[in-house]
Amino acid sequence: MSMSLSQVPGVNGKLLRRIHRACKPTLDEPNLALNLEICDLINEKQGSLPRQAAIAVVKLVNSRDPQVSELSLSLLDNLVKNCGYPFHLQISRKEFLNELVKKFPDRPPPRYTRTQRLILGAIEEWTETICKTSRYKEDFGFIRDMHRLLGFKGYIFPEIKKEDAAVLNRSDHLKSIEELQKEERLAQSAKLQELIRRGRPQDLKEANKLMKVMSGFQEDKSFEVSKQEVAENIEKLKRKADIFGDMLNNATNVGKIDPTDETISELYGTLKSSQSTIQKLAQEESDDPEAVNTLLSLNDQVYSLLEKYNFLKEGDISNASKVKSGGGINLIDFDDDDTGSVSPVNANTNESDAVADLLSDLTFNERQASTSVNNSNSINDLLNLGSGTIHLGSPGPQSQIQEAQSPSLPQQQSNSALDDLLNFGSAAKSTGTTTAPAALDPFGMDFPSTTNSVVSQKRFLLHESHHIKIEYEVQSVNPFHFRFFYSNVAVQPVTSFQFLVAVPKLWDLQLKPQSSNFLASNTKDAIWQDVTITSKSGDSSAKDVKIKWKIDYAVSAVTAVEDGVAVIPQSQ
């Protein structure tokens, strides 16, 4: 045995000694700890070690000592299941497979030896797993060819165990894009090394293409493939979370969790292990607000389900029933009034493709009562505050009177593309307005106020997401004095909360400090803040205020950003 091993050219001495120890004929059973140590060594060093290990092990498989053959096949099984694509590429080589079945006669014997049964089982397992489900199954053609050849000669393959196949099949366990890209780079490196080693013209041509991809001179499609795989796994995780939630609801109704139910335990383990990956994905997708919101929503749902499971496991049915297991994102509340009192203006205000000037849009007729709805779909970066879609306020009494008198109203449509917050002379958004009928003011006595006016402190919704709800009160106009209230509508606490706001340069902004930067879970008005906006010209005529806002906060160490544009009409 030692002679055959020593004849293997270029074998790493440390690797050779460990393989020799793992396949000693004096061992009664495989030394699993040593086998895994060999796997760790190969995974750590990579390079040519997967090939060296494959050559050394397959020589031992053909040993005259049946015990050595069985031990080497056990080591081979551990290597295949723990060393990934670099080793899979080596066992798919024609030379390796021919050496593996070297002692198989052309015609099957009446009774297989134990070594033959183990080899047939290994080939069957590889064919049904990595040759069908691996990301790189196209590279394993020789394994499929050997399986067909043995079947054609009359060899019968044993049925593989489900648990053995599960190890080699692709797992739907959620991985981050970074982890998938790391696996891809490792696979590319192993494939490049094998192509160069073969040295055939077609291999060198393929190696040249692969080097261009690895060096960045050619587009690497693997990144998009990784993103698609992550998206599919997220959808699978959502379905598992829904199933887990239904099972927990049933357990809540019954009053306990069935300890013998393996499914619920498996789902719990899957969701528990995915938490850190979800947070990592949220950081990787920080440039895509929609993806971040989706991931944070899923993170909330998983957190709630795990919390509910722990309550049920402890027998605390009361607290378990209070935990909300839904993870959907709440839609923005478009109005503070009941649905029945919403005016057609708010229901039908649309966007336009051309608007001239922000300041002209913010100047209104003296007898005009305005209710503004601001839809922003294309806004350039303003002081790096992002963009958003905001709907503010509720229809005033005049809007409701006119709704009763007129079935249809003219609409103004708006769509803005703002270049810079400090230069509000660029394209802007106009607001849909309703004009009170002249019959309500026959003598034209509806003049604008010329003094500071105090308005009723009715609360209006500025923004609501799956974590944060922002409301405000207009405490006075000319100048505008607002008080903003920030609430946490999720089950997880929010830290490092910061509210930023900007206004056109014709206005002065005074932003008072926040009362806090921490929002406990499900806490209303956890933070409040005063904001004063004054016209620089001193003009006290009624003008709507256009603001650009942004919030930064962290949930479970994951940073989130939300932003938007809003027009706050003076009529509020």
Image (spheres, rainbow, N blue to C red):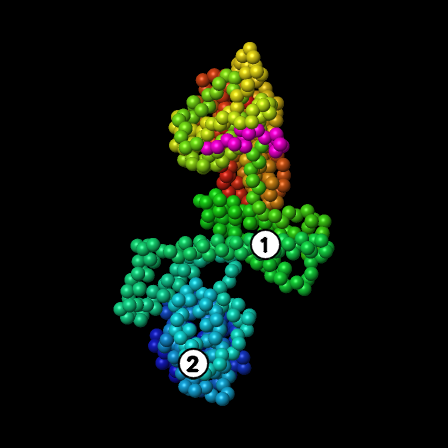
Mark 1 is on which residue type?
Ala
Give the magenta part as a residue range: 336-351
**Percent coordinates x, y for residue 383 in the rendering:** 42, 33
What residue is rendered at 48% in x and 18% in y? 365
Residue 500 position, x and y percent, is 49, 33
Label 2, on which residue? 152
Say which of marks 2 and 1 sits in front. Answer: 2
- Residue occupying the far left of the picture: 201
Amino acid carrying label 2: it is Phe
SS state under label 1: helix
Horizontally, is 380 left or right of 519 in the view? left
**Quadrant assignment for the N terminus:** bottom left
Circles 2 and 1: CB distance less than 8 Å?
A: no
Q: Which of 223 and 151 is in front in this view?
A: 151
Q: Can residue 422 be seen in this view?
A: no
Instruction: Classify residue 518 as left or right of residue 356.
Output: right
According to the image, label 1 marks what residue? Answer: 241
- Specify whether residue 504 is painted magenta: no
Q: What element carries label 2?
A: helix
Residue at 72% of width from left, 49% of height from top?
318
Establish if 10 lies above or below 388.
Answer: below
Q: N-terminal of the two: label 2 or label 1?
A: 2
Alpha carbon of mark 2 to alpha carbon of mark 1: how far? 46 Å
Task: Locate the C terminus and report the quarter of the image it occupies.
Answer: top right
Name the residue located 63 percent from the left edge and 36 percent from the top edge: 524
Q: Does the magenta stretch include residue 341?
A: yes
Q: Dot 1, how many residues are within 10 Å of its Cα: few (below 14), some (14-19), or many (20+)? A: many
